[in-house]
Amino acid sequence: MLESILITIATAATPLLIAAMGELVVERSGVLNLGVEGMMIMGAVTGFAVAQTTGSPWLGVFAAIVVGAAFSLLFAFLTLTLVTNQVATGLALTLLGLGLSGMIGEAFIGAPGVKLGTLYIPYLTDLPYVGRLVFGQDPIFYLSILLTAGVAWFLFSTRAGLTLRAVGGNHGSAHALGINVVAIRYLAVMFGGACAGLAGGFLALVYVPQWVEGMSAGRGWIALALVVFASWRPWRVLAGAYLFGAVSIGQLHAQALGWPIPSQLLSSLPYLATIVVLVLISRNRRLTMVNTPACLGQRFVPDR
Amino acid sequence: MRIELVKRPQHSRLFSALSPFIAFALTLAAGAVLFALLGKNPATTLYYYFIDPLMEVWSLHELAIKAAPLILIAVGLSVCFLSNNWNIGAEGQFIVGGIVGSMLPVLFPDLRAWFVLPLMLLMGMAGGAAYAAIPAVLKVRFNTNEILTSLMLVYVAQLFLDWLVRGPWRNPAGMNFPGTVRFHEYAVLPEILPASGRAHWGFVFALVAAVVVWFVLARTLKGFEVKVLGQSPRAGRFAGFSAGRVVMFAFLVSGALAGLAGISEVSGAVRHLNEKLSVGYGFAAIIVAFLGRLNPLGIVAAGLVLALTYLGGEAAQISVGLSDKVVRAFQGLILFFVLACDTLIHYRIRIARPKAAVAGEADHA
Amino acid sequence: MRKTLLALAASAAVLIPGAALAQDKTKACFIYVGPIGDFGYSYQHHQGLLEAQEHFGDKLETAYLESVPEGADTERALERLARSGCDIIFATSFGFMDGTNAVAGRFPDIKFEHATGYKREHPNVSTYNSKFHEGRYVQGVIAAKMSKAGVAGYIASFPIPEVVMGINAFVLGAQSVNPDFKVKVVWANTWFDAGKEADAAKALIDQGVDIITQHTDSTAPLQVAAERGIKGFGQATDMIKFGPETQLTAIVDDWGPYYIERIQKVMDGTWEQSDIWGGMKEGHVVMAPYTNMPDDVKALAEETEAKIKSGEFNPYTGPINKQDGTPWLAEGEVAEDSVLLGLNFYVQGVDDQLPQ
């Protein structure tokens, strides 16, 4: 039973992890993209639509990634080229994404989905207690772990990662050094979009294989909170995502066990927990200042 | 070929006034394309969307009802956004205002006197302000990001309301369905012109609030503080303005107005508290605030325009068969275009040719 | 039933030519609380509209508004429809109650029908509802027969009387087969959230239930049940597509017969205020085909259904005790409709605390 619960938690945590990882890279480059929810749901609807029409869930995954990145281009153009307010533009992206996805998804409501299969390694997956958890999950789960490792390695062990962090830390100096700040940010935003799209695709192809309007259900916002919670460090994002997943699943179990706590209170636990954690994290100003990308959310116009 | 932005030394006044209209025109154009793609006649659909709701008096009343909370909340948000405080939790403050304001008629249903309604309105404002104080205090004391805290609190408020109207505040005579007792006539926000429609005094509050806040922002020291600290925290510090005080001020004002919108909606349009209070006004108001260029007077117009899209969406649904999902996409588009057009106010656009870029200082002014 | 209606329609058309001519087309309008594509509650109401449209052909014009919020916007939506020439308006969700009554007062010549409500403040307002719990009883019978663990998982939406009635009926049906049958309840606090429903189903299965049933509208729980290899029940519509080897049956809300009947009355000019609570007998509640079960279970299910349909048996017949053990219905005593419509307590055997 514990293994089953852990798998359920992993399924709940994976979309949060992927979306947050993408946003982490974006924010490390100095851009605040509040449109994660919008990109996620666009990924979900396209992933589902493509999988439905072609019959291939992998094509669906691919489509979700592409659409997420493409949708984020809209945000990038406005905030990086036209230098609009990042907060408002991100919100606009979310609203547009929610609306557009509803429109596109209309034709697909009520259709049973195509589900991405799970891994099966003959001897390993059948191991008791850990078999399914470690060796029997869907491919995107494994991808999410690889993604975390990959981003951590990229940011802190490569030159390109250093450049990205420099852009986020002081775009003026980076620009003076000849680094193309805008180009790097474009790439970062698109990476973030691709991740959010993938997370959405996961929702529609693995979590609940069908399309439901608004199915991202606020996960994009949770992902944003996770990035702050993790002080912009990849492995902490993983911890945060799993913690949040555990609280969300835990409250359902509490209900099923018959605990006499109002279900609304249990349902609000994940959100209250996020606030508490955010407060605790930001209390330590030095810790926050050391880790927050200094130029987060600030406009940048290249002068020659 | 590269798009280059050259910062204007001063905001272009021409574009400050024009940009919302340009944005609106662009949205109409995009909308027409969208409708055509969906197989509907663009001209008729646009008519049903924007003209038809204005054609009858009852519909104008409905417009006022829909616009009132949008304007009220957006006016408060303008104070926040101008001072760089991103209050995304107005929806939560709206709900809490509605809850606190409803305490009198729900907990003391036999108290019937002329002062019940004004007291309810004040309590609603207090409730909204108190709830908005949470992210404000967290920001000032613990440096916590107010976007995330205020947003999380929206979910908490929604769940709290749900618990309240299904549990302790449930109407005992309501067949165990969620919702409080219906408010008595002393607790109901009356209609302005009962003979011709349902519009209640909430709309008047919205207009009054817009004028008052406009005045504060444009002509008082506090307004100046707000705007300076929003644009340049350092300049504000040098001038001796307390950033912390302004954060509290902005959130409290915003929360109070959102709370007023909440209790007006509860006591005017619905006349009891139920779990359906939250429909997203707090988020739509963000669009209204930007569409109105963060100017309370502009927000009045913007609120009416956005209310029009809601009403128009319904009209289009019935007459043309347009799906209601288009409404939200439309609203997102409006915000996009508004923000894009705003660039014209701050920057001049130049298409720079590579050769000219190399030529040096002379090209840049 | 339909034949009678057709005969009536035919005779009406012959006997009341004047009325038929003057009333060229009748217009029936609907407002839905959700999207018609939700494949659940609103979808079924819309199916009712389509059935009526097909039945009446050219004599009926229809219009509808979907995803109407149940608050301040309700009145506006209803007013708009009222002003667009509707003769009868169906408000298909409980939360439309106050709005329906308010608008009905302003338009005395238009007929208003409110689903699942209880207020009829004007003579032109009727209410209607379906005895879904009859179907739940049958499901309970099947569940107890099919379950080895003796525990079922129930994914519920909100603690309103209709839902509580359903849970209780399910338990009673199960207990008629296995007196020790238990039900675990998880409140999703939503009518429709596929992710949450899926998680709730997983949590219940992890805690040992081997039958899943739901009073929420998405197909997610059934899909999870299919994944885990256990059986489940569909909700509001036949969800067999989502669980070809999983779905035992589903309660299908068939509003068509009622809509056709009421629209016919408007056409005939015989519409009167009514408060109809129809069940299997009236054709409001239909069970999806019994699948994925052995023949003897199927036979028992059909037998139970037949008994309820004929009126011979009422699921809420005593002896029944409340959850705390106190007696509620004596032997042979049948629960009153008014009590059921406001039900806020569990019967014995439910493993949950009802929010009070």
Image: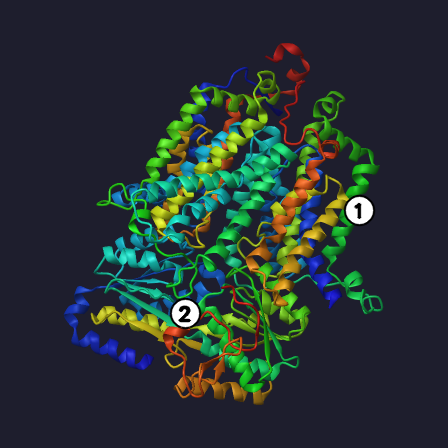
Mark 2 or 1, closer to the camera: 2
Residue A174 is at least partly visible in this image: yes
Of all chains, the one bearing label 1 is A
Question: What residue is at 33 percent from the left and 36 percent from the top?
Answer: B204
Front-lying residue, B121 or A249 = B121
Viewer-closest of C23 and C165: C165
Q: What residue type is labelled 1?
A: Ala
**C331 in relation to B217, above or below:** below
Q: In this view, does B242 lie above or below A185?
A: above
Quarter of the figure with residue B235: top right
Chain letter of disc 2? C
Q: Is residue B198 above or below residue B208?
A: below
Quadrant where the image shows the N terminus of chain B = top right
Q: Which residue position is annotated with label 2?
A: C342
Q: Position of residue A64 (x, y in %)?
A: 64, 50
Check disc 2 and give the amino acid type. Gly
Residue C4 shown left or right of residue C44 in the figure = left
In the shown orientation, is residue B133 left or right of residue C61? Answer: right
Q: Name the residue under label 1.
A: A149
Label 1: element kind: helix
Q: Is residue A170 left or right of residue C21?
A: right
Q: What x and y, as percent, mark residue B149?
A: 59, 41
Q: What's the distance in space between the residues labelled 2 and 1, CA to CA?
A: 56 Å
Out of A119 and B58, give the one closest to the viewer.
B58
Q: Report the residue that reaches farthest toward the top.
A: B362
